[in-house]
Image (tube, grey):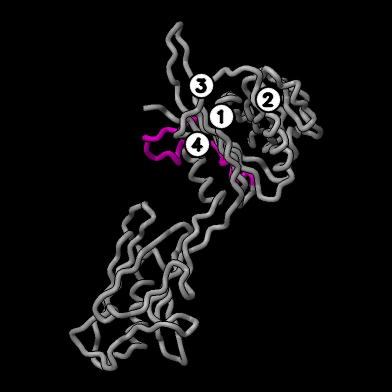
Amino acid sequence: MINEYLNLVVAKPTVAYAAKTGGGTIANIYEINLLAPGAIAIFTEENVLVTTSTSAGSLVGTQQFWIACGSLDGRAAIKTAPIDRNAFHQLKTAYVAPVKQVTIVGENSAGNGSLNLPVTLVTDTSAFLRIAEITGTYQAGDKLTYEVPVAVGETQHTLVAKMVAMINNNVQSIVVAAPVVDTGVNVGITLTAKDFGVAFEVGYAELFANATIWKNGNGTSVTVVQGQGTLAQLTQLEQEADITTRGKSASMGQQHLWWKQPSELTFSGGTNFVTYNFKWKSELSMGAYVKDAGVNHAIVAIATGDGLIATFDTILALLAQAPETGSGPSPEGEFSE
């Protein structure tokens, strides 16, 4: 098994490339710890600062580069491992807003569909729904069954109201239910995911067996969109990076009592980001023996709309030009994006 080491570099919005604490721009590697909090800078293996003014010719023969970011609390600058110009994979991903899934049982807000209930509801029958999460993260509320027995004098209006209340009163529910009302009567149920990124399926039986189900964008339903570059996604990656590269234990209990490293994401103040993914292999040489030392993974996050994006793109375009001779291992297909 090859270990993977993740670095997360988060730029602070409106902080210029290679900005220096107190003003101006850092001159070279010797001023790396003067990088302004959240300022990003890229250096070659010779520790030369790369800027938009750097010529492609000056990079001939340069085999590696690394990315640094000014820390938020006076610590040493955050640095990635050296990235080989011949071996790294880079993927730039624009921010995509997440969208919550919406599924409708029965008539939708456009007046289409039906619960198709019997004209008269009788006791000893029930309305049945099962809501199951299918996003792959299984927790207590992943598959919940709701059954409403018909009471004496029950109507479609009261039956729907009871089902809506039953779903919303369940603290483990992954959806929020709301009645669809037509001329003062409950005619359907709208189910909206509580959280972004949650996908679910609806099962139905008994009195709801013949109900119209609106899903996957049909009618007024909405298909889930996971999104890209969201704060929630990057928060999860930051927690992983804390373990693989910043020293946080993956097994020690009560980590909130001793893990005091501040969140770079919280400090950045950003809520949605353009992300740059880099993956590359590193090797360990011991005489004539060469072995894989692991997979390095760096993610750079820059707030959407920040002028730094254009600067970063220009510099990466320079570095993406292959050097004169290769130095690192060629990437395998598994790293392709």
Q: Is residue 145 above or below residue 209?
A: above
Q: Is residue 100 above or below residue 108?
A: above
Residue found 46% across the figure and 72% down from its top:
218
Expressed as whole percent of the image width and height from the top left, the position of residue 231 reads 56, 50
Asked whether 259 falls inside the magenta stretch, the response is yes
* Mark 4 vs 1: CB contact within 8 A: no
Of marks 1 and 2, the one in the foreground: 1
Query: Which of pointers 2 and 3 lies earlier in the amino acid sequence?
Result: 2
Residue type beneath disc 1: Phe
Residue type beneath disc 4: Ser
Q: Quadrant of residue 213?
A: bottom left
Residue found 31% across the figure and 57% down from its top:
140
For disc 3, the marked residue is: 329
* Local secondary structure at mark 1: loop
Expressed as whole percent of the image width and height from the top left, the position of residue 87 reads 55, 26
Q: Check the picture and name the quadrant holding the N terminus.
A: top left
Q: Residues within 10 Å of mark 2 (few under 14, many from 20)?
A: some
Residue type beneath disc 2: Phe
* Local secondary structure at mark 3: loop
Say the numbered circle drawn on residue 43. 2
User: As rendered, which of 77 and 200 lies closer to the eye?
Assistant: 200
For disc 4, the marked residue is: 336
Locate residue 44 relative to residue 144 in the image: left or right: right
Query: Which of pointers 3 and 1 lies earlier in the amino acid sequence?
Result: 1
Say the numbered circle drawn on residue 249. none
Residue type beneath disc 3: Pro
